Image (spheres, rainbow, N blue to C red):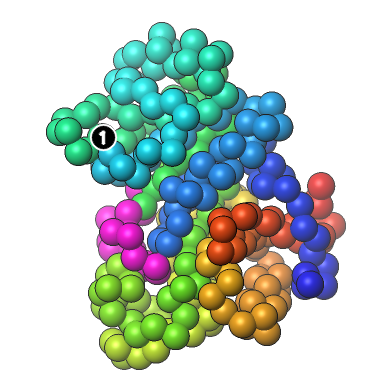
Amino acid sequence: MTSQGTSVRPLTHIAGPGDIVAIVGAGGKTTTMFALANALAERGLRVVTTKSTNIHRPSLARSPRLLISPPDRWQTDLPPALDAHPVITVVTAAPTPRRYNGIPPDLAPDLLRASGADVLIVEADGARRRLLKAPAAHEPAMPSGATVVMPVACLAAVGRPLAERHVHRPELAAEILGIDSGANLTIDHALQLLLDVRAGRKAAPPDAQFWPALTATHRVAADQLASARDALAAQANVAGWIEADSDWSYSAFRLASPALGAT
């Protein structure tokens, strides 16, 4: 059941030609990035995925095509790769056997243009595999020109204590949430970290569309999830949101407000 004024749409409604998508937060960013990229490719779009942080190699194991290409080679290397594969992942160097270098965030528009891609998706945050996150002063590495911002929160955190094993930078999260370290986390806390300008909204361009993502939705009760949907639908600056369940099947909920131009 959806909230009043919303409708379920394909992930392809989130982005289109010319968009730069920034994914931040914790609890499923990489999986969300490739789910969106593959959905857009099925629509017929050419997609580049990348990160604006350093990358551990295993996190890109799901990439259908990985290229190590410095910025001065993008215009030569990337268009032929996109001709052969509608989704490619670009990193700039491999300084160690276990690590790649992502792109400088200010070069995101250059990467989109030089590659000839329709959409660029940038994972712009790190969370050390935690379920939730509060960003430090230097985070996120928001790409220049971001037109869509997607903060991610994993609802498996609900009912667990606010602690380092579940939340990246728990001391900052405690300050944002106004709770003590060790307190049990609620679904409202997860939503607050998605929506707060010190967390999920941090550094988001004011004109970017805002698409929060809830992962592991099966880990909360149906009434809790319905309440979360109502809370998101009540946010004037939320264009829509996405949900991923136990098998990482995604649904996108688009607000049907005329002001947002429902499509």
Establish if 146 lies above or below 95: below
Amino acid on which disc 1 is placed: Asn
User: What's the residue at 68%, 73% (across, down)?
Assistant: 229
The reply, left or right, for residue 67 in relation to residue 6 is left
- Tell which residue pokes out farthest to the left in this image: 96
State which region is magenta: 126-141
- Tell which residue pokes out farthest to the front in this image: 247
The answer to whether residue 33 shows anywhere in this view is yes
Q: What secondary structure is the magenta-colored segment mainly? A: loop
The reply, left or right, for residue 45 in relation to residue 71 is right
Quarter of image, res 24: bottom left
Q: Quadrant of the N terminus?
A: bottom right
Q: Nearer the viewer, residue 244 or 262?
A: 244
Establish if 72 lies above or below 99: above
The answer to whether residue 196 shows anywhere in this view is no
User: What's the residue at 28%, 59% (across, down)?
Assistant: 128
The percent position of residue 202, horizontal first and vertical second, equals 43, 60
The percent position of residue 89, horizontal first and vertical second, equals 42, 30
- Residue annotated with mark 1: 101
* SS category of the residue bearing label 1: strand
User: What's the residue at 48%, 66% (across, down)?
Assistant: 153
The percent position of residue 234, horizontal first and vertical second, equals 70, 74
